[in-house]
Image: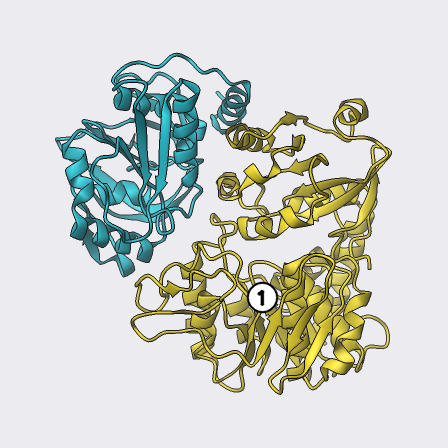
Chain colours: A cyan, B yellow
Amino acid sequence: MAAESTLRFISIYPVLLGTYGDGGNLQVLSARARARGFEVEAIELEAGAAVPTTADLYLLGGGEDDAQVAAARALRADGGLGAAAANGAVVFGVCAGYQILGAIFPGSGGVPEPGVGLLDVTTDRLPKRAVGELLAVPTFEGLHQPLTGYENHAGATHLGADVRELGRVEVGIGNDSVLEGAVHGRVLGTYLHGPGLARNPELADLLLSWVVGAALEPWVQPDIDALRDERLTTVRPRR
Amino acid sequence: MRLRAATGLGRIAGGLSKSLRRGDGFVIGGRVVLAACPDALSRLVAGRRVVFVSATNGKTTTTRLLAAAIAAAGPVITNGSGANMPAGIVAALARPPVGVPADAPAVLEADETYLPGLLAATTAPLLVLANLSRDQLDRVGEVAMVARRWRSVFAATVGGLTAVANADDPQVVWAASVIPDVTWVSVGQRWTADSALCPSCGSILRRSNDPNDPAWDCVCGFRRPQPSWQLETADLGDVATLVGPDGARYGLELQLPGAANQANAAMAVVAANVLGVDPAVSVPPLRSVASVGGRYQTVTLAGRQVRLLLGKNPAGWAEMFAMLAPAPAPVVVAINARAADGKDPSWLWDVPFEKLAGRHVVATGERRHDLAVRLLYAGVMHTTIADPWADASALAEIAEPGRVLDAVGTYTAFRELLRRGGGADDGG
């Protein structure tokens, strides 16, 4: 994609899927793209509105159970997100948004609810809610730095044959205490709040590189390095 | 007598804790009482009119204002220090101020997650319910879950439950509408992101495009109840007006700043009215409250005057920007993420810190780096300092020493500032 064209990022229904600060991911991606000279149009989509199919990147955040079901139903009825993904758009889902990208998740009262089926994953209930810091060693190509974030969910996510995990869990639960996240093509899901892209700039730049079709020049920020150092030092078990 | 023995033990434990400088000893005393006498709460409130004040934001201040409002009509007992879990409430009741009779009403701030358990120990309390929004999601849980739990407990409570509740907050209305006797008050809802959906059916609530119009309703028929009392908020420095059911207008002259405190005062005046204290009596004493639990107090830190503000969640921060000294005045923001703050500070991304542009922000507290990254992306000039009060010269370069400096902290960061500044825990 040419630098002079404007990148379009859409946050899907942030009023429903924005309980855990995940709105920050849109800010992070927009700022990091602008820092590299790209123009960005950042759009927050009103709850239930039709999803435009021509954007470059779509974001789904965490939300409460009823809000998650409402968002999933609106997205299934609309069909725009699936069409955009089929066109090669990048899709990034966190927590409830990650579960929605899968085939099925526990809706209100635990009743199984279909997702939009962009990731070959299914989610059911963890025996105990996962609340706390999440640290994973990346296994996905292009990621080298530890993945750090905060998780707060009751979902156990099982990966199908058509997806790869993002990393292996070192601290916390992630998908299932062993693996964290799922990727298929340009669709990526994770349990990392924080927001995840504020705490993991490498992951943010991986998504942006998919959008622009090229690796991005470094954008080093001491504030971000200091945050990562502090979190990794605090969260890592002492050996 | 078991209760008396237990409160005696609690006093000893509290005194010991205080003399060992392990805190003010208040809550420890309450824990000891509860351990020795598990039904202490129901025995301590027997024969009293009990009021529980609960909300995500403003419950400490509303409790304080309500206690001041009804104290004009007679003695009252209250947990004024913000110790709002069962141990703190028991401690307050077990150590009443001298001269407060055994039948004096109890005005008690209640943590929103503990409110259901507290109801089981009391008979026919009055509830004062103002707002529910995201806060400490790791401990409290999601807002809809809190509202659902309140509703089921309120519905299961038999005998004489009454409430004063905010008609503008859909989650509060959903919970309170199962109570047979509710006095609805319109005090506004400035943070609406946690009530986008109908709590009854899950559809998206319909709201007016006019942010000053508090009306909301749903296709399922769930809608904002008609309030009998209405707050007309005023800009900073002006006097808000509370309009009663008969059209009578009461000017709420306050020392406490901001629209949120006007809402707190309105809830207190209506609750006092339900308790039989007329606004003509209850409104004037509100002005005597200048600081609640140290909020808005000016203390001396690193040899300079510092005004302390509590900013612990997005809804609270929504009120904050108007209260700060105007730009380019610098501001210190202290972020912790201990249990009492909520261990996940990602709520910082729900706060529009872009509004601090044009100022120099000192990022401090145990999670100062989370704040620094937030400010980086918000484009706000900032300096990260582990302890700005130990490094007066670094601070002096950012903030002119002669001026009062605003410092905003999360709950434990704020308490730390108050302690170091030697501020009164419950001044005013």
Q: Is residue A220 left or right of residue B323?
A: left
Residue B40 visible, this angle: no
Say which quadrant the C terminus of chain B sits in.
bottom right
Q: Position of residue B162 (x, y in %)?
A: 55, 82
| Residue B381 x/y as whole percent | 62, 27
**How many residues crowd around disc 1 within 10 Å: few (fewer than 14), some, or many (20 or more)?**
many
In the image shown, does A86 or A37 lie closer to the viewer? A37
Nearest the viewer among A20 and B416 is A20
Quarter holding the N terminus of chain B is bottom right
The quarter of the displayed image where residue B254 is located: bottom right
Residue type indicated by callout 1: Ser
Chain identity of mark 1:
B
- Mark 1 sits on what residue? B54
Which residue is depicted at the point 86% across and 77% down?
Answer: B99
SS of the residue at dot 1? strand
Please state if B266 lies on the left or on the right of B114 as rendered.
Answer: right
* Quarter of the view holding residue B76: bottom right
Taking the image as shown, residue A139 lies to the left or right of residue B53, namely: left
Going by the image, does B212 lie left or right of B53? left
Q: Position of residue B95 (x, y in %)?
A: 77, 68
Residue A148 rendering spot, x and y as whole percentages? 42, 28
Q: Nearer the viewer, residue A206 or A112?
A: A206
Most extreme residue toward the front, as rendered?
A: A4
Q: Residue at x 59, y 58 (%)?
A: B57
Residue B262 visible at all: yes
Q: Is residue A35 above or below residue A130?
A: above
Number of marks in picture: 1
* Image vertical order of residue B330 relative to residue B265, above or below: above
Residue B292 position by quadrant: bottom right
